Amino acid sequence: MAAEAGPRPLRVALTGGIATGKSYCLAKFAALGAATIDADVLAHQAIAPGTAGFDAVRSRFGESVVSVQGGLDHKALARIIFADPDSRRALEAIVHPAVYAAIDRWLRSLGHAGQSRIGIADIPLLYETGREADFDVVIVTSCDPGQQIERLMARSGLTRDEALRRIGAQMPVEEKTRKAGHVIDTSGSFEETDARLLEVWRRLPAGPEGPAS
C-alpha cells in the first residue's frame, strides 16, 4: 500500500563558500529537527565504482584518476579540475544532474506522512548551477575571507595558493550573501554562530518556535 501523502515540506537550500561552516550549520539544523542531506555526499555516490558517473569520469579524464583500489583518486581528480576550468565544467556536467535528481527524490519523500516538515539540502554550488529557484528558502553561511582561507588550509592541507584557487572557483561569498534569504555569519565563536542559526531557524515559515519536526 502506498504511503499517505502529507503536506509539502519546506524546501531549504544551505549554501555558501567552501570552508564557511556549512557542515557545522547543517548538523545544528538536524539537531533542531530538520531532515538534512549533503550534496557532497551525493556527488561522491554519483561517481562511485559501478555507476554510470564513474564510467563517464574515467572516460573523460583517463586512468590517471583511478586509484589502485579501483575507485576514483579524488586528490588526483581535484588537481586536474582546479587547474583547468574546462575540466571542472566537464566533471560538473557529469555530477550535478545526478545530485539534483537525488535531492529532488529525497525532498519528495519528505511529503509522506510521518516525515519532517522541513528539508535542508547542503548544496555548495547552488548559485553557480542556477538552481536556487528550486527551493523555498536559501540560507548562506559566510565568514571573514582570511578565516575562510585559514580554515580551508587547515582542514585540507592545501597551500595558500591552492586554497585561493579553490575559493576562486566559486562565486564570491559576498555575492551569495546578497542573494540569500538568510545569512549565518560563522566568523565569531560557536556560541555566536549558534545564536544566529537559532534566529534563522525561528524565522523559517512555521511559527515562532521554528519548523516542527
Image: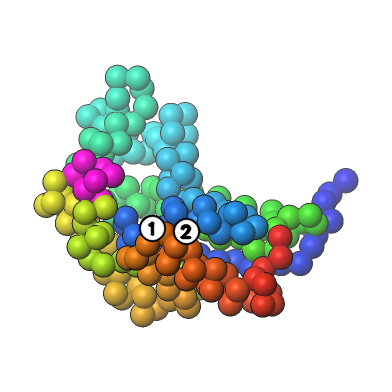
Residue 103, above or below 191: above
**Residue reaching furthest to the bottom:** 178
Asked which quadrant contains residue 36, the reply is bottom right
Question: Colour mode?
Answer: rainbow
Q: Is 191 in the magenta?
A: no
Three-letter code, disc 1: Gly
Asked which quadrant contains residue 4, the reply is bottom right
Q: Is 153 in the magenta?
A: yes
Q: Identify the secondary structure beneath mark 1.
A: loop
Residue 199 image point, x, y percent: 53, 73
Three-letter code, disc 2: Cys
Residue 155 image point, x, y percent: 28, 44
198 and 89: which one is in front? 198
Circle 1: is it few (<14), some (14-19), or many (20+) Cα within 10 Å? many
- Residue at screen point 67% across, 68% down: 211
Asked which quadrant contains residue 73, the reply is top left
Q: Which mark is residue 190?
A: none
Can residue 61 be spotted in the picture? no
Type of secondary structure dominating the magenta stretch: helix
Determine which residue is flagged by label 2: 25
- Residue at screen point 37% across, 27% down: 71
156 and 68: which one is in front? 156
Determine which residue is flagged by label 1: 21
Q: Identify the secondary structure beneath mark 2.
A: helix
The part of the chain drawn in magenta is 152-158
- Please say if the residues under marks 2 and 1 sit with CB atoms less than 8 Å apart: yes
- Residue at screen point 76% across, 67% down: 7
Quarter of the C terminus within the rendering: bottom right
Residue 94 image point, x, y percent: 39, 47
| Residue 25 in the figure: left or right of residue 153 | right
- Residue at screen point 25% across, 51% down: 152
